Image: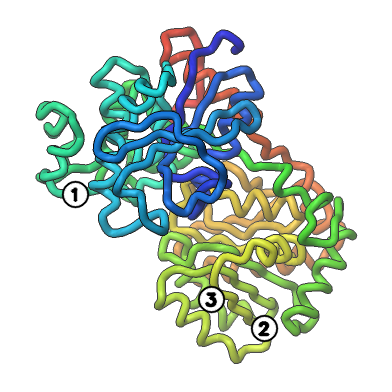
Amino acid sequence: MSAFPMVVHVASEVFPFSRSGGLADVMDALPRALASLGVPVAVVSPWYADITQDVREVWRGADGWRLGEARAEGGVRFLFLGGPDFDRPGLYGPDDVPRFARWGAQLLPALAAAGVRAELLHGHDWAAGIAVARARQVGLRSVFTVHNLQYQGRWSMDLASVTELPGSAFSPEGLEYYGGVNLMKGGLVFADAVTTVSPTYAHEVTTPEFGEGLHGVLRARALHGALHGIVNGLDQVRWDPRADADVVPFGDLRGKAPNSARLRAEFGLDDAPIAAVVSRLVEQKGIDVLVQALPQLTRDWNVLVLGSGDPLLEAALTGWGHHPRVRYMSGMQEALAHRLYAGADVFLMPSRFEPCGLSQMISMRYGTLPVVRDTGGLRDTVPGDVGFLFGAEAPEALVGSMAEARAALAKPKVWGARVARAMGMDFSWAGPARQYGLLYERVMGRSADVTPAR
């Protein structure tokens, strides 16, 4: 791919400059994996006031808009488009839809003014919707990736005036959505190809159950061969139990024992097996199902939960603080997350839907077997001879799957074989990057095949 055109990724966050979740991690790892294949690649994200790394200004335009560039890493250029809307603390706020619409409208002109020649635009989630629509307007090929369809960037039709798009772009075939504007829809309809972050989720979003009101649009894209599922990879350097400074390094099941002992000492746990959760505490993640299952789970398991989110779910978990087998830790504590992945026996993800998920991959890499709902990327990444999958959105289903895990744990040879398979799985970005490269070639008019939506 040495002669490949410049691919510019557009996203609202990128690690290590800005991060609120998994999107930032993808924007760190995927571009580097593409660059290793010889694809010229850049990432453009907002120039948030909280970015502390050295970013030099390379262009300044009217009305306070400016483009900056950080030092390239791993063959990837990191660019930051800033403006008055982003000169404040924090990443997100209540006015995100109009400010990201303005941001998307300014993006291509700013790149051109700074001499950055984008030949293919790859937008990620709703914040990149206007940039993808502008790309279609100027004849620039584009790919649009849905990381989570639940968040769509909806606003009133007043938004049209800040996008610098023609009125025709706001028809029912474009950005219009029930009388307003939907930036996610803009990405879906104006991109040359649409991807989701797992093959199963690519199918699920074409159904009313998972399509979040956009299933008709996605079904139409699928029927025309423009919807594809490419599962995310994992940064296997950052998540490597053999070289993780936050845990007692290990490479097999026997090496987990010191990490389990460390967790028991840290939280005063008895000798029952340990189940861990590291998650945003939201309905999507099935945390309410977990809370309902705790009375039965705690008969056989210690349960450790790390995360924050919905105040009601936080309060429900806090209410279990009296129980000797339940520990809830608020917030997102990176070092503690590593210790949980390393020391637990199983990892719980009772998600109602899961576009891809990274936690189940991390847990398997650390020999902690996932107990997950049979949905989306969980289905695509958790083999039945490694983890434990259940179907219903019900505490009884979770409890049943945990009983299967407990029975397997009681058989050392069976458990050891599962753990060995888990720790030997390849979750690197090399395969997904090759699939994206093939998709780029197809979008640019070259012969290629990629993973279609089923």
> Circle 2 — which element?
loop
Identify the amino acid type marked 2: Arg
- Give the foreground label among 3 and 2: 2
> Circle 1 — which element?
strand
- Which of the two labelled residues, at mark 3 and mark 1, occupies the earlier sequence position? 1
> From the viewer's perspective, is residue 212 above or below residue 230?
below
Q: Which residue is mark 2?
A: 325
Q: CA distance from mark 3 to mark 2?
A: 13 Å
Q: Residue furthest right?
A: 254
Q: Which residue is mark 1?
A: 155
Q: Which residue is mark 3?
A: 293
Question: Which of these two is toward me, 388 or 358?
Answer: 358
> What crowding class fits label 1: few (fewer than 14 Cα within 10 Å), some (14-19), or many (20 or more)?
some
- Horizontally, residue 280 falls left or right of residue 126, namely right
Identify the amino acid type marked 3: Ala
> Circle 3 — which element?
helix
Q: Residue furthest bottom?
A: 322
Q: CA distance from mark 3 to mark 1?
A: 38 Å
Residue 318 image offset from top left, x and y in percent: 52, 83
> What crowding class fits label 3: few (fewer than 14 Cα within 10 Å), some (14-19), or many (20 or more)?
some
Residue 393 image offset from top left, x and y in percent: 45, 63
> In percent of the image, x 41 and y 58: which residue is there?
90
Q: Specify the quadrant that holds the N terminus.
A: top right
Q: CA distance from mark 2 to mark 1?
A: 45 Å
Residue 47 image offset from top left, x and y in percent: 42, 43
> In percent of the image, x 43 and y 21: which residue is there?
116
> What crowding class fits label 2: few (fewer than 14 Cα within 10 Å), some (14-19), or many (20 or more)?
many
- Give the foreground label among 3 and 1: 1
Identify the amino acid type marked 1: Trp
Residue 106 image offset from top left, x and y in percent: 29, 32
Question: Which of these two is toward me, 184 or 381?
Answer: 184
> From the viewer's perspective, is residue 120 above or below residue 447?
below
